[in-house]
Amino acid sequence: MGRRKGSKNKEPTIDPLHTVMTSEERLEFIASLIVDRIEEDQEDGHKLLDKIGGQDEHRLA
C-alpha cells in the first residue's frame, strides 16, 4: 500500500542507539533508569513507594 498524496516522510520513532545495544548494555540502561526513579522518589517523600505498597520497606529505610 502506497502513501497518500501529500503525506510527508516521518522520522522513525525508534532511537537507533537503543536498537544496537547489547543485552548487558540494555540491562545497565534499565537499571540506571530504575535507580534514577528511586532517587527521585526519595527526594519526593516516598510517594511512589507508598503508592506501590512498600510501606514496610519505607520504615526500614
Image (spheres, rainbow, N blue to C red):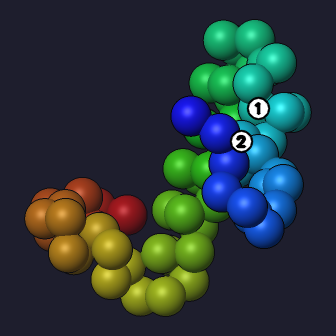
Nearer the observer, 47 or 1: 1
Q: In which quarter of the image is the N terminus?
A: top right
Name the mark nearer the viewer: 1 or 2: 2
Q: Residue furthest bottom?
A: 44
Q: Is residue 60 found left or right of 45 in the rendered image?
A: left
Q: What element carries label 2?
A: loop
Residue 44, given in percent of the width and then of the height, sits at 49, 88
Residue beneath disc 1: 18
The three-letter code of the residue at mark 1 reads: His
Q: Residue 14's quadrant in the figure? A: top right
Q: Which of 41 and 10 is in front in this view?
A: 10
Q: What secondary structure is found at the residue carrying circle 1?
A: helix
Residues marked 1 and 2 touching at CB (< 8 Å): yes
Q: Where is residue 43 in the image (x, y as percent from the top left)?
A: 56, 83
Residue kind at label 2, given as amino acid type: Ile
Query: Could you tell me which residue is drawn at 13 percent across and 65 percent down?
Result: 53
The residue sitting at 68% across, 48% down in the picture is 3
Residue on which the image places disc 2: 14
Q: Residue 26: x and y, percent?
A: 67, 25
Q: Residue at x 66, y 11 (%)?
A: 23
Q: Residue shown at 66%/57% (left/top)?
A: 4
